Amino acid sequence: MKCVAIDDEPLALQLVQGFAQKTGTLDVVATFTDAVRAKDYLQQNDIDLLFLDIQMPDINGLDFFSSLEKKPLVIFTTAFSQYAVEGFNLDAVDYLVKPFDFERFQKAVNKAADLIAYRQNKEINEGFLFVKHNYQWNKIFFKDIDLIEALDDYIKIYLHPKPILVHMSMKAVSEKLPPTKFARVHRSYIVPVEKVDGWNKNSIRIADKTIPVSYTYQKQVQDILQKKME
């Protein structure tokens, strides 16, 4: 899980970083003592989990989180237990009262991991995923996807009547797609299996598009498409 920590105390940030590294599941991609800089970063980057102090000199952490347009999961960290109810009213995953030990930290992280897994499974089971486009989150149904193409730091999702560009990696979108319905056929392409009209070892045809199949994925693609015919 990619996470960010915000606290006006550098020692508190060091503690979170140390505990995060110890979990083996958290990747602290940024830390901030300045809430303004932190907000700019969060607006421009997608993260899974935010560790957020409440008592900060420039802004209250609760107000800071409420002001975010794009809200990740949040674990509040503070020395003041009286904010707990308000924190949970903001759908916080957990509320860590300083000083907290690694065992308590790990328990909070496990809650976040379970919630992320639940949301991903729900999306897959119900046949959709959420992507950010034009500064807002949009629900995309699997049945509406004709093709996914990698373009540098973006992916192009082909939909009717027109495709959309999303700031997302192929790896990230692959993790959100059911493997029985979508196949990675090339470093730059993911195809919906049900919309494949024809194929050979080196290419796939969907409507009027011909998509290359790279050597790396040939065996995997052949197995998936053969099952489609059974």
Image (cartoon, rainbow, N blue to C red):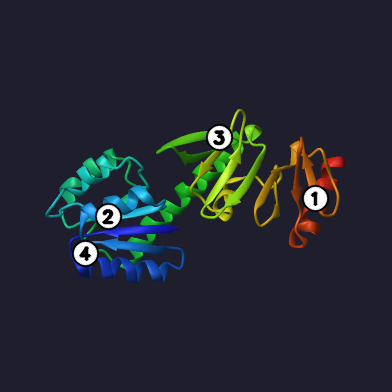
Kind of residue at disc 1: Ser
Kind of residue at disc 2: Ala
Q: Which numbered disc, 4 or 3, marks the residue that appears first in the sequence?
A: 4
- The answer for how far apart the CA atoms under marks 2 and 4 are is 23 Å
Residue occupied by mark 4: 99
Q: Residues within 10 Å of mark 4 (few under 14, many from 20)?
A: few
Which image quarter: residue 96?
bottom left
Residue occupied by mark 3: 140
- The answer for how far apart the CA atoms under marks 3 and 1 are is 26 Å
Q: Where is residue 200? Give x, y as percent.
A: 86, 50
Q: Where is residue 142? Give x, y as percent.
A: 63, 36
Q: Nearer the viewer, residue 211 or 85?
A: 211
Q: Is residue 95 visible?
A: no
Q: Which numbered disc, 3 or 2, marks the residue that appears first in the sequence?
A: 2
Which image quarter: residue 30?
bottom left
Q: Which residue lies at the image location 21% right of the left edge and 70% below the top edge?
A: 11
* Image-based side of 38 in relation to 157, left or right: left
Residue occupied by mark 2: 38
Q: Is residue 129 visible?
A: yes
- The answer for how far apart the CA atoms under marks 2 and 1 are is 45 Å
